[in-house]
Amino acid sequence: MKKPVYLDYAATTPVDPAVAADMMNFLTLDGVFGNPASRTHVYGWQAEAAVENARRQVAELIHADPREIVWTSGATESDNLAIKGVIGQRKKGGQAKAHIVTSVIEHKAVVDTCKWLEQGGVEVTWLRPDREGRIAPEVVAESLRDETAMVSLMMVNNELGCVTDIAAIGALLRQRGVLFHVDAAQAAGKLPVDVSALNVDLLSLSAHKVYGPKGVGALYVRRSPDVLVEAQMHGGGHERGMRSGTLPTHQMVGMGKAFEVARESLDAEPARLEELRDLFLSGLEGLEGVHFNGSREHRVPGIVNLSFEGVEAESLMLGLRHLAVSSGSACASATVEPSFVLRGIGVSDELAHRALRFSFGRFTSAEEIEFVCSQIVDVVTRLRAVR
């Protein structure tokens, strides 16, 4: 049976063959399988060297110092460590009041973490984006208080692909002395990320969004006395005391290689995806009642969110059996509620229920896009005819 055309790269990416090949050298007896924390023999030394090389590769993509990279199990853990860690450290320092600023369209890893902290007495201001899904710097500025501990915002929205002006927000927060956490899981490898230029203090990364393996990520923690993070996992005091646990060498190697490939492809890949995006949208021009959700100008090229009048998203996905797409974020796909992100930018429940996210990437071809467009036109036309 022929596999469906994969257009859900925002949910996860396939591991690049070069990444998988490197990882295979760190699993078995004839490879480097030791514990990176074993300092008494060559097996441990080799594993530690591989982990540190991968740390450097991750740091280079975001223009950070390798010592500022803390390994985690993924962006969800990175988000939790950043937000809970800053608040925990603040309370440990005797500062009873804590205030967080975030938005209503963040990833669930941020939204649910902030809601959990609210239950414990932390005050949270929930910003609303504009109609394009972007958070304006002036809106952030208006939300700040004397007790604001941090602001947490995503760089690229995972459902819409829109890009918030992180640099402008970072500049005003650095001036005000407020810590800035950015979820960059959907940004890394898609557009340039320079943590110094962005004035970011903490930044979450994920390997499996950048053609690396699942189950590994990183948190950038700026080396500064002002940026203190309380550990959420305790054990051997790994990762400068911020994240205990034996490091899975093969996962780190995979993430490092994936980020190295992404850095080398940072000019060519977005340009190719832009061409595919134009081809995709032009292929649907003859279809009436199609609504574009998000920003047409400030966005990454590989994510397109569309609502189709008169067609429920679930019915459309069933009809598009030769395509793999989603009706929103993979982390919330089990719910029948309309996307909270689309609601957050003012899309009606009716159109939110009719929205699909199409995301393409490194292994998507122009031929596949043409096939996808023909399938969408055929299925939407047929479903509208039988209403």
Image (cartoon, grey):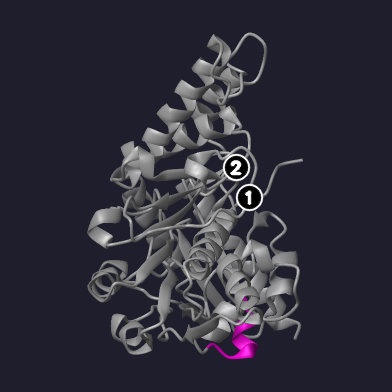
The amino acid at mark 2 is Ser
Q: Is residue 8 visible?
A: no
State the SS at label 1: loop
Q: Is residue 76 visible?
A: yes
Is residue 29 rendered magenta in the image? no
Magenta-drawn segment: 347-355
Tag 1–tag 2 contact (CB < 8 Å) = yes
The amino acid at mark 1 is Met
Residue 231 placement (x, y as % from top left): 56, 53
Residue 262 in the image: above or below residue 229: above
In primary-sequence order, the first of circles 1 and 2 is 1
Residue 364 in the image: above or below residue 40: below
253 and 90: which is toward the camera: 90
Q: Which mark is residue 247?
A: none
Residue 300 in the image: above or below residue 94: above
Instruction: Give the spatial CA distance, label 1 vs label 2.
Output: 6 Å
**In the rendered view of the protein, which quadrant contains the N terminus?**
top right
State the SS at label 2: loop
Q: Which residue is mark 2?
A: 244
114 and 342: which is toward the camera: 114
Q: Which residue is mark 1?
A: 233
Which residue sits at x=69%, y=71%? 316
